[in-house]
C-alpha cells in the first residue's frame, strides 16, 4: 500500500488528480520564467538606478545660470568703473554650491574631473574678485578684470557645458545598454515560451481529456436545474476527487434548494393569509355598522352635509382597499386611505380626537405596501386616544434625505408601560403578538424591503406613543436610490 500524506491521500493519487497535474504543469512553467524574471529585474533596476542618477545630474547642471558670465562680468565692470559698489559674491557662491552638489553625485571619472575644475575656477574667481576689491587705481583693476575675471567666467561656463555633454553621452550609453538587455531578454523569453508552449500543449490535452466528460455532464445537470429540475439524482462519476465532490455538492444543494423553495412558498402563503386577515379585520362589520349608524344619526338630526361627507369618506376608504388589485401603492394613495379613515373616526370621536397629516408632496410617489399606516393609526385611536381622559391628537408625518424615507405615527394617548413596550418590541417577529396590526405592517415591510427596514416603537405611559418606520425611498420595485 502506498504511503499516505497528512491529508489522507496518497502521493500517487495526488499526482493523478487534476489539481496535482495542474500544479506540476505550473511549476514547469514558473521556474524557468522566474529565473529569467529575476535576472531581468536585477539588470533593469541596476540600469535604471544608473539612468536616474545621470538624469538627475543633468537636471541639476541645467539649473546653472546661463547668464553667469554676463552677470558677473557686468557687476565687476560697474564696480571697477565706480558705478556700483556691489560685487558678484552671490553668483559665484551659487555656482560653487551647484558644482559641489554635482561632484557628490557624479560617478563618471571624466565628468568628475570636469566638475572639480569648475570648483577650482570658482575659488580662483572669488580670489580675483577680492584682489580687484583691494586693488588701488583704475588701471590696475581694469587689467585684473580683463586678464582674470573675463577669462575665468568664460572657463566656468565652458566646463559646465562640457560636463553636460559628458553626462548626456553617458545617459545615451545607459539607454543603449537598456535597449540591448531588453532585446536579449525578449529573445530568450520568446525561445523559452515556444519550448514551454509545445510541452504545455501536450500536457493540456492530457488533462483536458480527463476532465471534459465529467464537466460536460455537470454542465448538462446544471442546465436541467436551471430549467426547474430540482429533484436530486445520482451524482456524476468522475476520476478526480474534487469533481466528484462538486457533483455530490450540486445534488445536495438541489435537495436543499427544493426544500427551501417549499418553505418559501409556505411563508408566502402565511403572509398572504396574514394580509387577508388584516384586511378582514379592518373591514369588520362592527366598524361598518358603527359608521352606518353614525351616518343615519347625522341624517336624522338634519346634519346632511356631515352625513354626505362621511359617506364620501367611507366610499374613499373602501375604494382604497381595492387599489385596483395592487399590493404596492404610492404614499399618496396610502395618505388618501388614512385620511378617509380618520375623517370617519373623527365624526364618531369628534370630542376626543384631532389629527394632522403632514406629508411632503415631493415624496408622494414613494412606494409602500398597502395598509401600512392605517393599522398604526387605528392602534393609536383604540389603544391610546380612547383610553385617555380628555382625548388626544394624532400626527402622521414623513421625512426624506433623498435615499431613505421615514414615516411617523405619533399620538398623545395613554402610551404604555415599559413592560408592555418591551413585550411588543420583542414580539414583532411573532405572528401571535397582541398588536396584530403593528406586526402585520412590520411583516409586510420586511417582505418587500428585507433587512433595510427599521421599525421603532417608543412610548411613555400617560404621555403617548410614536412609531417610526424607515425604508428605502423607491418609486419602482427593485429600484434603490
Image (cartoon, grey):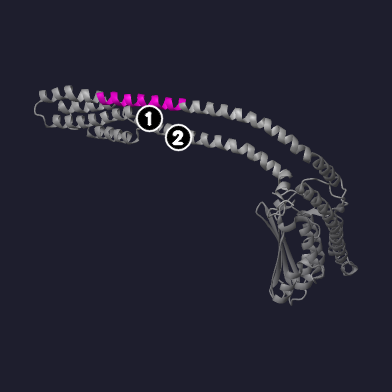
The extreme left residue here reads 136
- The spot of residue 411 in percent (x, y) is 72, 69
Residue drawn at point x = 67 percent, y = 52 percent: 403
Which residue bears the numbered disc 1?
58
Q: Earlier in the sequence, mark 1 or mark 2?
A: 2
| Residue count near mark 1 (Cα–Cα under 10 Å), binned few <14, some 14–19, many ≥20 | some
Is 185 rendered above or below residue 318?
above
Tell me which segment is drawn in magenta: 155-176
Frontmost residue, 281 versus 269: 269
SS under mark 2: helix
Q: Vertically, is 460 above or below 96? A: below
Q: Position of residue 6 (x, y in %)?
A: 68, 55
Residue lying at the far front in this picture: please name it.
Answer: 1
In this view of the protein, which residue sits in the foreground, 30 or 314? 30
Please name the residue shown 71% across and 73% down the image.
Answer: 422
* 251 with respect to 125 (left or right): right
Q: Position of residue 426 (x, y in %)?
A: 74, 70
Q: Which secondary structure lies at badge 1?
A: helix
- Where is residue 459, by image quadrant? bottom right
| Magenta stretch prevailing secondary structure | helix
Q: Position of residue 245 (x, y in %)?
A: 78, 50
Give the camera-side residue of 431 and 296: 431
Q: Residues within 10 Å of mark 2 (few under 14, many from 20)?
A: few
| Residue indicated by mark 2 | 46
Query: Closer to the camera: disc 1 or disc 2?
Result: 2
Confirm whether the magenta stretch covers residue 342. no
Marks 1/2: CA distance?
Answer: 19 Å
Q: Is residue 417 visible?
A: no
Q: State left or right for residue 105 relative to residue 342.
A: left
Residue 328 higher or lower than 76, as above or below:
below
Whether residue 290 sits left or right of residue 20 in the image: it is right
Q: Is residue 79 visible?
A: yes
Amino acid at each position: 500500500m502506498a504511503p499516505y500524506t497528512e491529508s489522507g491521500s496518497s502521493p500517487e493519487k495526488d499526482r493523478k488528480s487534476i489539481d496535482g497535474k495542474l500544479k506540476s504543469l505550473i511549476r514547469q512553467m514558473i521556474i524557468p520564467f522566474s529565473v529569467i524574471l529575476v535576472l531581468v529585474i536585477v539588470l533593469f533596476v541596476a540600469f535604471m538606478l544608473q539612468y536616474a542618477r545621470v538624469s538627475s545630474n543633468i537636471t541639476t547642471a541645467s539649473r546653472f545660470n546661463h547668464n553667469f558670465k554676463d552677470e558677473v562680468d557686468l557687476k565687476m565692470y560697474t564696480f571697477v568703473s565706480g558705478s556700483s559698489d556691489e560685487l558678484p559674491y552671490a553668483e559665484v557662491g551659487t555656482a560653487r554650491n551647484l558644482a559641489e552638489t554635482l561632484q557628490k553625485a557624479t560617478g563618471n571619472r571624466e565628468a568628475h574631473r570636469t566638475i572639480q575644475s569648475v570648483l577650482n575656477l570658482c575659488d580662483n574667481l572669488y580670489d580675483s574678485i577680492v584682489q580687484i576689491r583691494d586693488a588701488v587705481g583704475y588701471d590696475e583693476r581694469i587689467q585684473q578684470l580683463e586678464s582674470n575675471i573675463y577669462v575665468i567666467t568664460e572657463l566656468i561656463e565652458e566646463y559646465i557645458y562640457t560636463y553636460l555633454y559628458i553626462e548626456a553621452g553617458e545617459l545615451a550609453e545607459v539607454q543603449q545598454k537598456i535597449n540591448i538587455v531588453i532585446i536579449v531578454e525578449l529573445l530568450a523569453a520568446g525561445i523559452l515560451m515556444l519550448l514551454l508552449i509545445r510541452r504545455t500543449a501536450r500536457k493540456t490535452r492530457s488533462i483536458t481529456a480527463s476532465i471534459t466528460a465529467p464537466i460536460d455532464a455537470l454542465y448538462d445537470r446544471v442546465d436541467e436545474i436551471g430549467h426547474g429540475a430540482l429533484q436530486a439524482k445520482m451524482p456524476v462519476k468522475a476520476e478526480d476527487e474534487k469533481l466528484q465532490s462538486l457533483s455530490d455538492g450540486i445534488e445536495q444543494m438541489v435537495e436543499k434548494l427544493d426544500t427551501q423553495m417549499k418553505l418559501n412558498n409556505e411563508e408566502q402563503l402565511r403572509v398572504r393569509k396574514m394580509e387577508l386577515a388584516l384586511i378582514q379585520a379592518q373591514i369588520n362589520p362592527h366598524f361598518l355598522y358603527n359608521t352606518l349608524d353614525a351616518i343615519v344619526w347625522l341624517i336624522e338630526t338634519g346634519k346632511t352635509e356631515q352625513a354626505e361627507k362621511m359617506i364620501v369618506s367611507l366610499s374613499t376608504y373602501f375604494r382604497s382597499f381595492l387599489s385596483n388589485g395592487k399590493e404596492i401603492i404610492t404614499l399618496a394613495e396610502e395618505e388618501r386611505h388614512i385620511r378617509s379613515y380618520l375623517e370617519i373616526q373623527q365624526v364618531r370621536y369628534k370630542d376626543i380626537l384631532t389629527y394632522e397629516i403632514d406629508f411632503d408632496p415631493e415624496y408622494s410617489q414613494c412606494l409602500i405596501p398597502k395598509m401600512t399606516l392605517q393599522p398604526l393609526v387605528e392602534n393609536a385611536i383604540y389603544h391610546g386616544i380612547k383610553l385617555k381622559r380628555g382625548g388626544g391628537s394624532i400626527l402622521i408625518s414623513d421625512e426624506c434625505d433623498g435615499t431613505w424615507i421615514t414615516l411617523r405615527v405619533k399620538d398623545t394617548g395613554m402610551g404604555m408601560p415599559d413592560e408592555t413596550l418591551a413585550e411588543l418590541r420583542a414580539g414583532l417577529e411573532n405572528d401571535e403578538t397582541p398588536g396584530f396590526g403593528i406586526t402585520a405592517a412590520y411583516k409586510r415591510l420586511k417582505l418587500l424591503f428585507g433587512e433595510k427596514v427599521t421599525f421603532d416603537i417608543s412610548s411613555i405611559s400617560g404621555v403617548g406613543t410614536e412609531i417610526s418606520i424607515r425604508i428605502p425611498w423607491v418609486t419602482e420595485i427593485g429600484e434603490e436610490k
